[in-house]
Image (cartoon, rainbow, N blue to C red):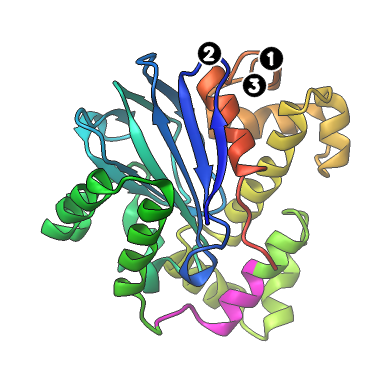
Amino acid sequence: MGVEFGRVPGGSWDFASPATPGPGGAALIGYRDTGGGGLELRVAGVAAVTVLIEFGEHGLLIDDAGGRRALGGFVAGLPLDAMRIRGERAACVEVRVSPLRAYSLLGISPRDLGRGAVALEDLWGPRAVRLRERLAAARTWDERFTVTKSFLVENDSVRSPDPQVVESWHRIVGSGGRVRIGALAESVGWSHKRLWGRFEAQIGLTPKRAAMLVRFRSAVDELLAGRPAAEVAVACGYADQAHLCRDVSIFTEATPGSLSANYLPLIARHRYRAWGKFFQDPV
């Protein structure tokens, strides 16, 4: 059975999460606008490939690296630029997948996703339309999560990155992004050039950029908990607060102060709590 998070105070949103993860360890949540207040999200990069499926009647309005577009859902990779998502009476299932399983579950390499949102129809064609229709026809969150998981299973294949890339990714995530990048190639027995090329081709970022992203996500959790930026910089292994500010600016186009105080509107705060923390690939 799904875990119902219930409604946001004021009765404006419903949130839910399945009791078990999807195939390949995919994480899922669902949220639905029940009060007509509208969806308003600003999304920065996360150490996962994200799938957002809108199954209401109005779709989503996306502002990203590709400009402004009306979409029924999208897939976004790791090299994501800051994105704004808006919707009227939005109803969504959101999925986060490790980049190690993105190709096998979604049928596309994270690198090929680029820096913006890829429309579901561009990736899956008529199958994406049928997926949205099935979600719209479902009556409960359990049914919607079952539909989504079944869709992912239909795509599932045995394709996966090289073992050396997998090991490097786990080292980066396991260290919170504080691994010595120069030592990665030596630890997996590859040349620096070979690891950099294969890692970027299969994950979507260079090892250095991936480490920046993972460390940034750890810092985001601390900032949103209200911890001062100077303390966050030390706790997350930044050389100083200026380097933390640089990464926050790169990934969110904001400052640590605005991120901790004003960055998340009500709907985004509840979405963040529904996830627990921003999804990181478990090691």
Residue 117, position in %: x, y?
32, 42
Q: Earlier in the sequence, mark 3 or mark 2?
A: 2
Helix, strand or loop for disc 1: helix
What is the C-alpha distance between the residues marked 3 and 1? 6 Å
Q: Residue at x 59, y 19 (%)?
A: 263
Q: Which residue is nearer to you in this view: 101 or 276?
A: 276
Q: Residue at x 88, y 29 (%)?
A: 231
What is the C-alpha distance between the residues marked 3 and 2? 25 Å
Q: Is residue 139 above or below residue 101?
A: above
In the image, which disc is placed on residue 261? 1
Q: Give the quarter of the image for residue 240.
A: top right
Q: Is residue 196 left or right of residue 128?
A: right
The amino acid sitting under disc 2 is Gly
The amino acid sitting under disc 3 is Leu
Q: Earlier in the sequence, mark 1 or mark 2?
A: 2
Q: Residue at x 42, y 52 (%)?
A: 77
Q: Residues within 10 Å of mark 3 (few under 14, many from 20)?
A: some
Q: Is residue 173 left or right of residue 19?
A: right
Residue 145, position in %: x, y?
41, 55
Are the residues flagged by discs 3 and 1 in contact, CB closer than 8 Å? yes
Residue 272, position in %: x, y?
60, 34
Magenta span dominant secondary structure: helix
Residue marked by disc 3: 259
The amino acid sitting under disc 1 is Ala
Helix, strand or loop for disc 3: helix
Q: Is residue 36 above or below residue 244?
A: above
Q: Residues within 10 Å of mark 2 (few under 14, many from 20)?
A: few
Q: Which residues are magenta?
A: 159-169
Q: Residues within 10 Å of mark 1 (few under 14, many from 20)?
A: few
Residue marked by disc 2: 10
